[in-house]
Amino acid sequence: MISCYTTQQIAADPLSDTRYLMKALRRDFEVRFHFEPDPWLSRGADVVFDRFPVPMNHGFACGLDDATDALVINNGDARIRFGSKQSLALWPHLTAPTLITEEAAEVRAFVDRHGWAVLKPVGGHKGQGVIQLRSSELGRNGSGDAIAAFLGTHGTAVAQSFVPDVLTHGDKRINVFGFEVISAVTTRPAEGSFICHESSGGTAHADEISARDEHIVSEVLPFLREHDIWWAGIDVIGPYLGEINITTPTMIRRADEAHGSTRGRDLVVRRLAEFCMGEQQ
């Protein structure tokens, strides 16, 4: 049995990864939806999906880990410790120059050093709250105030040197499920924007895994295995690891649509079938 915690809106949305995957899983598994954050509703399940939208309910996520012996996708401990951006510090050799700080002076020095940077909220999603700054503009056009306002709103900034490839080639999402790469899709920003998410006008395009992507994935996979993170979205911009989404990853449905196939969905079903068969033996 598979238990899926989510909202009624997401469960009914044909464009959501949650509905897309659960509909396919129902062919081989009993699937139960739970719309209340009660960990004990999943008793008896073999696999539990926590698909509640962000911001993450830490109490529920930890309680879910404690309440069930099932495979939890993804487990609360890993999601709290290694949210989408916190884990970047583990691979400084794969990322563009990155700084995570609460200090405005450190952000300013970082922008001065690299010339062009983006600031992201630690717990941000869908490109919300992301701004860009140029060293030539610091002290003018309210850029200094922008840093203070950003930190005042978000508390902590993830500052990264700007990677111009995002403007022409976009942000590639490499979907990993069950420690296997299942698909890749690139989202390109709208004209005049650097935000690649579709909610900001970005457009998704089928893509393939490059040799550089394979190298990045080979370094990240042992981390995913160690922390039992079954579903991850590895984002790559140009030659750099951008972030690893493990909180509520998406884009499997979008990648399948872009490729004109159901390969990603079918691999999810296969990996869970293999897991459940292994548990029964």
Image (cartoon, helix red, strand yellow):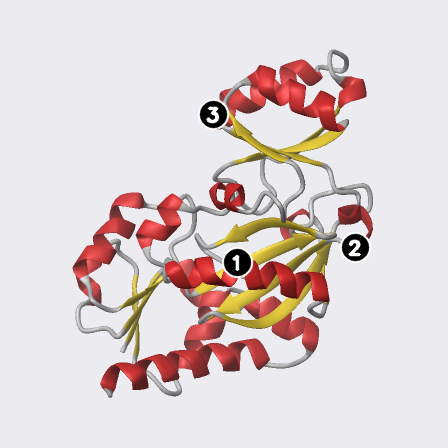
Any part of residue 148 in sight = no
Q: Earlier in the sequence, mark 2 or mark 1?
A: 2
Residue that badge 1 annotates: 220
Q: Amino acid at mark 2?
A: His
Q: Which mark is residue 14?
A: none
Residue 91: percent from left, percent from top: 56, 47
Q: How far is the residue under mark 2 from the one under mark 1?
A: 22 Å
- How many neighbours does mark 2 have within 10 angstroms: few (below 14), some (14-19), or many (20 or more)? some
**Above or below, comparing residue 149 to residue 79 in the picture:** above
Going 25% across and 45% down the picture, which residue do you hit? 59
Mark 2 vs mark 1: give the one in front: 1
Residue that badge 3 annotates: 155
Going 81% across and 19% down the picture, which residue do you hit? 136
Q: How far is the residue under mark 1 from the one under mark 3?
A: 28 Å
Q: Secondary structure at mark 1?
A: helix
Q: Quadrant of the N terminus?
A: bottom left
Q: Which mark is residue 169?
A: 2
Closer to us: 275 or 1? 275
Report whether 43 appears left or right of 262. Answer: left
